[in-house]
Image (cartoon, rainbow, N blue to C red):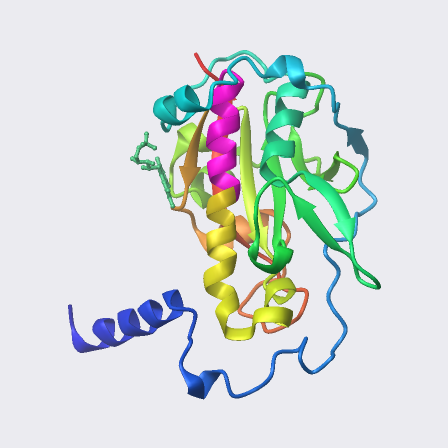
Amino acid sequence: MNETTKYKMLIQREMMKGYTAAYVQAEPTDQQQKLPAPGALKAAGNGKRIPLPLDFQDAVSNRNLLSLIRERESCRKYSKEAVPLNTLSFLLWAVQGVRRMAGRGEKITFRNVPSAGSRHPLETYLFIRNVEGVAPGIYHYLPSGHQLELWEDDPDYAEELTEALNGQDFAAEAPVLFVWSAIPYRTEWRYGWQSHKYILLDAGHACENLYLACEASGCGTCAIGSYNQELLDELLGFMPGPSGEKDYEFAVYAASVGLLP
Ligand SMILES: Cc1cc2nc3c(=O)[nH]c(=O)nc-3n(C[C@H](O)[C@H](O)[C@H](O)COP(=O)(O)O)c2cc1C
């Protein structure tokens, strides 16, 4: 490792500590400065909405926590059968579902996964190829109403998606690909320099819930951390970075999903 790489690694390691050093904490956070809080949820667009069933209990075939934890594993081969809509509904509920909203003014959400300060900086997008009753396309999850909204209906993105996933065609061709983006300012508003560590930890919680929910419902999943940032962000229509804007959003994690073969 040359000295430049070593130095860059040092910076990255410091990021993992949440930059607790006094010199970077000098400025009060935007919350301490009483600046308005960002919205807890991304505003819905004009895309067609698909309501997700909440009676997904039948999708859950294994409720034994010990066996779910013991048997969880990454799965990269999926059945050609379509994922039932109520199974997908269960997975989305487990991963980002909103239990309640609270607070005066700008509300915060409490969800099925924990998040630092309940800031919930993640959004969930789905690249759908094979889900019962859902046309292939890119969808955005609206957690407060438990709905999908059509984000992009051009299903002709297969090649670009494979490239964006660094050639991992098992993931690009999976019945569903979950992609989590982060809107960092939701967390930065409260936690400033600590935020970037927290946001990535939050993404880990979402994905672990997906692993367990898949195990419980006859699905397989594989976390995807290897992707091309620019290409995946472009496919999702995000503003190109880097950016310090408050609404800046970019992909941080993904996971492929399908029924077990
Ligand atoms: C942060 C993270 C990123 C990962 N990225 C990929 C990936 O890009 N491609 C892949 O095939 N597996 C990926 N995996 C899955 C790991 O390879 C897998 O968890 C590991 O081999 C252990 O296997 P297990 O999950 O079956 O226990 C990732 C896992 C994590 C936690």
- Compared with 106, 114 (above or below) is above
Front in this rendered view, residue 75 or 207: 207
The one of 163 and 21 positioned closer to us in this rendering: 21
| Residue plotted at (67% across, 26% down) | 89
| Rendered-image quadrant of the C terminus | top left
Above/below status of 76 relative to 48: above
Task: Name the image quarter holding residue 104.
Answer: bottom right
Q: Looking at the picture, does residue 121 appear above or below residue 66?
A: below
Ligand 1 sits in quadrant:
top left
Residue 95, magenta (yes or no): no
Q: Position of residue 49 (x, y in %)?
A: 80, 34
Q: Is residue 160 visible?
A: no
Residue 2: give x, y in percent of width and height: 16, 73
Examine the residues drawn in magenta and state their main secondary structure: helix
Give the camera-side residue of 184 and 159. 184
On the image, the x and y values in percent for residue 259 come to: 50, 17
Q: Residue at x 46, y 24 (%)?
A: 65
Residue 59 seen anywhere in this rendered image of the structure: yes
| Residue stretch rendered in magenta on the structure | 206-219
In the rendered structure, the answer to whether residue 24 lies left or right of residue 29 reads: left
Closer-to-camera residue (50/152): 50
Q: Residue at x 46, y 37 (%)?
A: 208
Q: Left or right of 66: which side holds 123?
A: right
- In reply to whether residue 207 is colored magenta, the answer given is yes
Residue 231 x/y as whole percent: 50, 51
Tally of numbered tags: 0
Q: Quadrant of the N terminus?
A: bottom left
The residue that appears at 48% across and 29% down in the rendered structure is 212
